[in-house]
Amino acid sequence: MSHITIIYESDYGNTQKMAEAIAEGAKSVPGTTVSLKQAEKVTADDMMKSDGVIIGTPVQMGSMDHRVKTFIDTVCGGLWMGNKMVGKVGAVFVTGSGYGGGGAELTLLSLLNNLAELGMVIVPLPKNTNGYEYGGLQWGPPTADPPGFIWNRTASRMKASQRPGIMAPMWPELRPP
Ligand SMILES: Cc1cc2nc3c(=O)[nH]c(=O)nc-3n(C[C@H](O)[C@H](O)[C@H](O)COP(=O)(O)O)c2cc1C
């Protein structure tokens, strides 16, 4: 049995919808339990009980949401000092307005850097993941707001494929052929 915690913040609902879609996908993986939490409410104990975490943020001024950053610097900072997250699995996602890039890629990379600092095993989003062509980035899924074409196509493909986005690479049996 694996436990995945999906951690996010959201002011206008886009990142929450994405988090819920990812949670739905994660739950469909046999032997997986999932919890969905806002970054402000995640404790060190939640992290310790997780085999994997997936962190999502809106892009704010080209970087991550301040509450997600606070979670990284406080909760994750303490875990970093004790090497408590080493070897656990981690992945990331963002939502943004997306026009001209808008910092989505930088934000994903910045979060991945935090996972690397924690010694986690990073799960990217391979380009052969179903739905990748509708808005994928190799670092993790980005979406556009308001949840429109790219978001809908990506989410519906994730559902239809039964290989829901970011979770696919975490379990070898779910990898696309
Ligand atoms: C103050 C502010 C700054 C933003 N900065 C960016 C940005 O730099 N790049 C981007 O792509 N989107 C930016 N956005 C758009 C949000 O990232 C986007 O609407 C996101 O989906 C909001 O997520 P939420 O609905 O979960 O709050 C910004 C939005 C706000 C309100």
Image (spheres, rainbow, N blue to C red):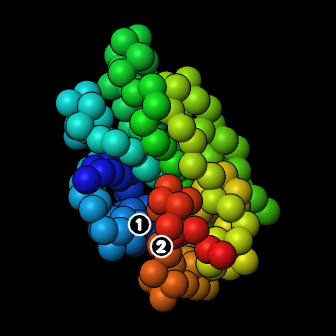
Query: Residue at coordinates 29% horizontally, 35% vertically from top-left?
Result: 47
Query: Residue at coordinates 45% horizontally, 26% vertically from top-left?
Result: 86
Q: Is residue 128 left or right of residue 163?
A: right
Q: Amino acid at mark 1?
A: Ile
Q: Which mark is residue 121?
A: none
For label 2, the residue is: 164
For label 1, the residue is: 22
- Helix, strand or loop status at disc 1: helix
Query: Residue at coordinates 50% horizontally, 67% vertically from top-left?
Result: 173
Indicate which disc, 2 or 1, sits on the residue closer to the N terminus: 1
Q: Amino acid at mark 2?
A: Pro
Against 164, residue 142 (above or below) is above
Picture coordinates of residue 102, whole percent (x, y): 71, 55
State the residue in front, 157 or 52: 52
Q: Which residue ends up furthest to the right in the rendered image?
A: 100
User: Would you say the residues marked 2 and 1 are in contact, meaning their CB atoms lie under 8 Å apart?
Assistant: yes
Against 15, residue 62 (above or below) is above
Q: Is the CB atom of the residue marked by disc 2 within 8 angstroms of ligand 1's nearest atom?
A: no
Query: Residue at coordinates 75% horizontally, 59% vertically from top-left?
Result: 101
State the residue in front, 169 or 8: 169
Picture coordinates of residue 83, whole percent (x, y): 41, 16
Using a 10 Å C-alpha cutoff, classify the residue at mark 1 as few (fewer than 14 neighbours), some (14 to 19) or many (20 or more). many
Picture coordinates of residue 71, whole percent (x, y): 37, 31
C-alpha span from label 2 to label 1: 7 Å
Picture coordinates of residue 24, whole percent (x, y): 33, 72
Residue 23: tell me if it is visible.
yes
